[in-house]
Amino acid sequence: MEFPQQQKPAGDGKIVYPPGVKEITDKISNDEVVKRLKMVVKTYMDMDQDSEEEKQQYLGLALHLASEFFLRNPNKDVRLLVACCLADIFRIYAPEAPYTSHDKLKDIFLFITRQLKGLEDTKSPQFNRYFYLLENLAWVKSYNICFELEDCNEIFIQLFKTLFSVINNSHNQKVQMHMMDLMSSIIMEGDGVTQELLDTILINLIPAHKNLNKQAYDLAKTLLKRTVQTIETCIANFFNQVLVMGKSSVSDLSEHVFDLIQELFAIDPMLLTSVMPQLEFKLKSNDGEERLAVVRLLAKLFGAKDSELASQNRPLWQCFLGRFNDIHVPVRLECVKFASHCLMNHPDLARDLTEYLKVRSHDPEEAIRHDVIVTIINAGKKDLNLVNDQLLGFVRERTLDKRWRVRKEAMMGLAQLYKKYCLHHEAGKESAVKISWIKDKLLHIYYQNSIDDKLLVEKIFAQYMVPHSLDTEEKMKCLYYLYACLDTNAVKALNEMWKCQNMLRGLVKELLDLHKLPVSEANNNAMFGKLMNIAKNLPDAGKAQDFMKKFNQVLGEDEKLRVQLEMLISPTCSCKQAEICVREITRKLTFPKQPTNPFLEMVKFLLERIAPVHIDSEAISALVKLLNKSIEGTADDDEEGVTPDTAIRSGLELLKVLSFTHPTAFHSAETYESLLQCLKMEDDKVAEAAIQIFRNTGQKIETELQQIRSTLIPILHQKAKRGTPHQAKQAVHCIHAIFNNKEVQLAQIFEVQAIKLLVRWLLGMKNNQSKSANSTLRLLSAMLVSEGDLTEQKKISKSDMSRLRLAAGGAIMKLAQEPCYHDIITPEQFQLCGLVINDECYQVRQIFAQKLHLALVKLLLPLEYLAVFALCAKDPVKERRAHARQCLLKNISVRREYIKQNPLAQEKLVSLLPEYVVPYMIHLLAHDPDFTKPHEYEQLKDIKECLWFMLEVLMTKNENNSHAFLRKMVENIKQTKDAQCPDDAKANEKLYIVCDVALFVIANKSTACHLESPKDPVLPSKFFLIQDKISEITPHHSLPPFMQPKPAPVLGAVNKPLTVPGRRIFTKTTTASDTASNTSTNSSPLSSSSINKNRLSHCTHSLIHTQRKQCFRQLRDFYMSCSNSNAGTESSESRAQENNENPVIKNDEGKKVSSDRTARCRPEAA
């Protein structure tokens, strides 16, 4: 607008004052000036725009009030009154101001702006006048006059700064409204907003300023909302220059550009309509730090609760998702962190995020995989519906991550979800069913080798799955139904957990018992062994050993601490008492001045594992009550998601497991009465489990609970006579474990099998003075030769013959565990026992191999029995061969570990060192009934496979030059004769050929075998006759030409799958010399060639029948003499499963063929 010419006052320039107002000059005092100005203010307030006469009359006064005297007056009251007058003058003379000079107008508006600072103090007496001034300016829009001034921007900037600085929380809504009106009119009616003016608004959005003056932030936010249509262009221009053109100098706020974008988006997304495409450009920047800043910004924009940016700007959203695969690690990490807020605030975007989180869950960076888990778990804890099954699957996968930190986060996260939704049912049954797999998965982790994983599973079980803080009834209810819902593998893991904890309690008890003994070197060595075993069950074995030594030292010095620890591991310790003991032990080991105490943390790990926080007498009683309710049909089984039958069966299985680890907790009449009810149920599994519980826990029933005893005996008799085979077996075990007069009880049930009675009787005597062991061994050998049918009348079923063969083989193994009987077992009898592992019945092979493995792994059987596993190379079933190999690995590992941990074992290396199994293996293979033609290709191939089956495991590592030791051992064997038949040239030839094959296998396996052997091997004289004791020199036997490495591939492919079909059956031939083979320990041996049914003569048949009749008579007489004796008996071995009748293979003429390999070793279960 054009400014009019200066108006001249009426009356020749004389200033006209309102009536009663004297002239205002610098001659009068300030008080008088204020007094007169108040009257002038009153006059102008009463005037309106239509008073033309008054306007002309007081024009001179209006010009006079704008003079320097008033504008620069030091008195603030004077300045305030003058400002009020000037505001009214602009109102009255609008739209044409009486001031035409640009400089004068600038001075006036700057003067008025300065007076607005008085608005800050709302308690000032003059505040109403300041408010009147603001109201007048806002209503009239007086500052719009400044648009025509060249430097109007200076006035507006000063005005905005003043208003933003004075506003505070004491101002009412009217003050804020007038400020808003005043500023918005300037923005909306002007030609544009300069960068400087925009800065005065935006600076209030920066976090630092925002926190200093919240009211200024609110004012700026409201102003931007009101003027969005006008100011959006200016904002876009600002961000364009900074983001795209890189002109950071255009504004002091350039460094806060991302903070401003976030705030502006929160105020009104329309403010950034033109800015968002610029961010997409920035996301593709080559500068990783710049991409990171943009990702952080967009994460906040997309993740904001009410944000619709992802749906409104799909290109930007897709570009942002691409940053999940950014090469810069911090960028990927920031994207993963954003996903948590996005899942919680925008569930509809979960589908877009899932695929990218899947990729990041396999990120090479540990921190990113960790944060993926945190993201998913945090969203799940807020609302399980926010995370789909696929996202939970990512967490499930990470429980097996290679990094402990990631595995721990995944396991703990799943545990927290389980406790919230399955245990507390915070989201209903549907959510509980959705994550019902968590309990099984967490327990499956107990199968991992890492002790850290095992300890964390135990912690999770105690704190999240069955919280030990619950009261006993609630805790046991939780355990009862959890056990019923677990899958088979999870149940086994939980059982193993209790078993390991019980084992550790046993180690601690043994350590405390050693503290009670006098100090000695042997005692110290024993303590050291216990401490090492305990340390293996704690994290970080190296540190654990040091800390356990220190803990042992503290135990030795502090008797009260030992008492607390003994109380903690006592079978009678209650859960509450355990908590007190742990607290007391921890308090004694706490050092107040030490902020971190690794020693104490390690001891806490130990205490957590051995403390009975779940099971005590009260807990067992609560479990039994729950079982009774399930039996009676009054339990909440259906509500818990299990059927009553499942609850009863799993409840008894739970009690059975606990009866192994906490037998003392069961000793109460109430508990046993409930178990008696279970014995009477029709469910076979339930009754069997109840019998086992009685067997494990009922040692004091006979002496302390007579009523229970009188009720239990007839039930056990009935189960032994008419129950299932498993029930009968468990009933016998139970009687043997509980009652003192067990022989009488067992005699009332059934007639004990003679063969087992004989063996148990011999084991009880532990001497062979009466030569009874020789007769027993001859009987067992005859039973094996006759395939279980001693009478040869073919009246015994195949299944019963299988059981007898298994029992005979097992009996020889049992006797071999006693040194006095092992010495009289001849090589022939050893070979007969070993060949059971190639029996035609699958179950016989399986059970015999398992018994053999268990006896060997406990170091109960002599080393030569380990050689029997070499025959498993001929087993046609792949799983059996794999099982045999695992048994070999385990046994060899156990023996080597035993030698390392026991210095005294060095003196017994011949009986312990795994390499010493080779002579026994060579001798066993040389007398293999299938090895009849030493130069036949297929038979040599079988020998090679058997040798390789054992040597491959033995030669995995060349410890202490063991390969050369093996070579030397085999070479030494070639310098001996077969002690079993030293004068039999063919037998010696087979022995030397097996040695040659063994040497060839060793040479092909190892290049170090030709080095010098560290020790001279010792050969067993029972199997090999040393050359210097005989007059002749043993001739050298080399391999046949077709077994050489180049022309024939027999021994080349040592790693190919085994395809040996099976073993021929043993025939039943014997000789007159055989009948006396066990008369003494040096009796003449059975010849392996005599075990050929096709060559059995009539005389030999008669002799065998005579011998069997004698054995039967001896067996009968012995049984009658021992029926009333007090000899101890052992529990019956488990019966072999029923075998189907094996088909008989016939030749072309229709005759039975018994020597066919497939007739002896069948892959199918019989």
Image (cartoon, rainbow, N blue to C red):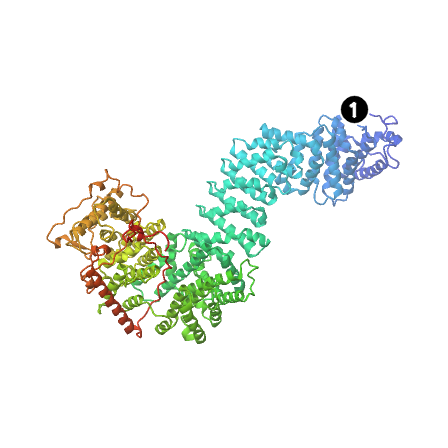
The one of 486 and 419 positioned closer to us in this rendering: 486
Q: In which quarter of the image is the N terminus?
A: top right
Q: Is residue 940 left or right of residue 455?
A: left
Locate residue 525: give its quadrant. bottom left
Task: Please indicate, yes or no, whether residue 596 appears anywhere in the rendered image.
Answer: no
The one of 302 and 268 positioned closer to us in this rendering: 302
Q: In this view, does 1021 lie to the left or right of 705?
A: left
Q: Is residue 152 left or right of residue 680?
A: right
**Horizontal and vertical percent position of residue 198:** 67, 32
Residue at horizontal 76 percent and vertical 42 percent from the top = 174
Locate residue 785: give its quadrant. bottom left
**Horizontal and vertical percent position of residue 463:** 50, 57
Q: In this view, does 269 lie above or below 762?
A: above
Q: In this view, does 277 lie above or below 1090?
A: above
**Horizontal and vertical percent position of residue 1047:** 23, 38
Q: How many dots with numbers? A: 1
Q: Is residue 361 above or below residue 1129?
A: above
Q: Is mark 1 on a helix, strand or loop?
A: loop
| Amino acid bearing label 1 | Glu
Residue at horizontal 23 percent and vertical 50 percent from the top = 931
Task: Please indicate, yes or no, whether residue 99 appears anywhere in the rendered image.
Answer: yes
**Horizontal and vertical percent position of residue 474:** 54, 62
Q: Name the residue under label 1.
A: 2
Residue extending furthest toward the front: 1149
The one of 35 and 874 positioned closer to us in this rendering: 874
